[in-house]
Amino acid sequence: MQIELIRALQNLRTPPLTAFFEIITTIGATQFYVFVLPLLFWWVSTTIGYRFIVVVLISAYLNSMLKDLGPLFISNQYLFYTTRPFAAYPEQVWTCRRDPLFDPQAVLARLCREEESFSFPSGHAQTSLVAWGYLLLTVRRRWFSALAVALIVLIGLSRMYLGQHWPTDVLGGWLIGGALLGGAFYLFSLWRLHPRALNLVLLTLLLALVPLLLALDDDPTFNRTRALGLLVGSSSGYLAHIRYAKFVVRAAWSVQILKLAIGALGLGALQFGLGALLPNMHLAELLLTLLIGLWVTLVAPLIFGRIWGVPSPPATVRSADERAPTH
């Protein structure tokens, strides 16, 4: 039944529809959400930006672990498929790279991929529900809610249309993402009540768990290492930012563009400058992504505050007795 559904979707394919779904599936990748973090943190809200990247990174890390550990516990392919559809049925499932019209020099060619990891659960479906679901529940605007729901559904469909996932992979990703999102909002509600205590707990967990996870985790793609580095860097930077790096988040558009330009220059220097010098190993990837997280949540905000000033403290309202003239 699953293969029939994928084939039914692929029978609708046209070049414009394929290009559309390649763009949509890119919006569901973790790299896209990491790109969104600076925009949220520098332009919208530091709290929303930080919590957004936390749920996205934890979702990406958990999904990668499930794909690596899943085949150890799931051996019956009639219950859960772990092989991608295009690999399990190469004669029946189409992929964009196997299309006779595929041009490796085309603009969208880099978006066209055949994933090599195991199939269940879909990381795009899981992380898109976590990311867009978080923003939907935070923004609470009717038009934005419709956009978020549409993107979640379209990203799931894109994974089947492109031959990368089974329907059960997408449904499993949505279920896991929904459970993770519910747990995140519960923790965020506790965070509002006990911010100092939970900040200390967060820092302690990071210092204790990250070295342990790195020591135990043999991650040849470095994806989980990068997620841990970004999580440590952005969390450490955010905790320091609360106290030391005040800056005006919402400003005139000219200021916002300049903030983005300064921030992008720093990110480019780290990614393409320092990144090119570091060796291809776990500790180097951890260091690079940790520094990127620190730049976004601490160093760049410090620069913004120095250039454009810090938010004015809220005005205090004097009581009637204080406003009365003295004699």
Image: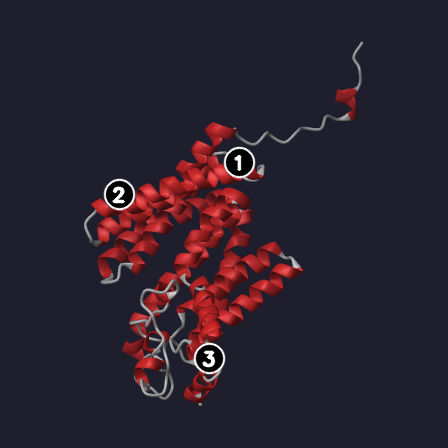
Callouts 2 and 3 close, C-beta under 8 Å: no
Q: Is mark 1 on a helix, strand or loop?
A: helix
Say which of 189 and 222 sits in front: 222
Residue under the image location 45 percent in, 50 percent down: 37
Q: How crowded is mark 2: few (under 14 residues within 10 Å), some or many (20 or more)?
A: few
- Residue marked by disc 1: 255
C-alpha gap between disc 3 and disc 1: 44 Å
Say which residue appears at 43% left-offset and 52% top-offset.
35
Q: Is mark 3 on a helix, strand or loop?
A: loop
Determine which residue is flagged by label 3: 13
The amino acid type found where label 2 is placed reads: Leu
Q: Which of marks 3 and 1 is nearer the N terminus?
A: 3
Residue 311 as seen in the image, left or right of residue 167: right
Q: Give the amino acid type for the residue marked by disc 3 in the picture.
A: Arg
Q: Mark 2 points at which residue?
A: 274
Percent position (x, y) of residue 71? 29, 77
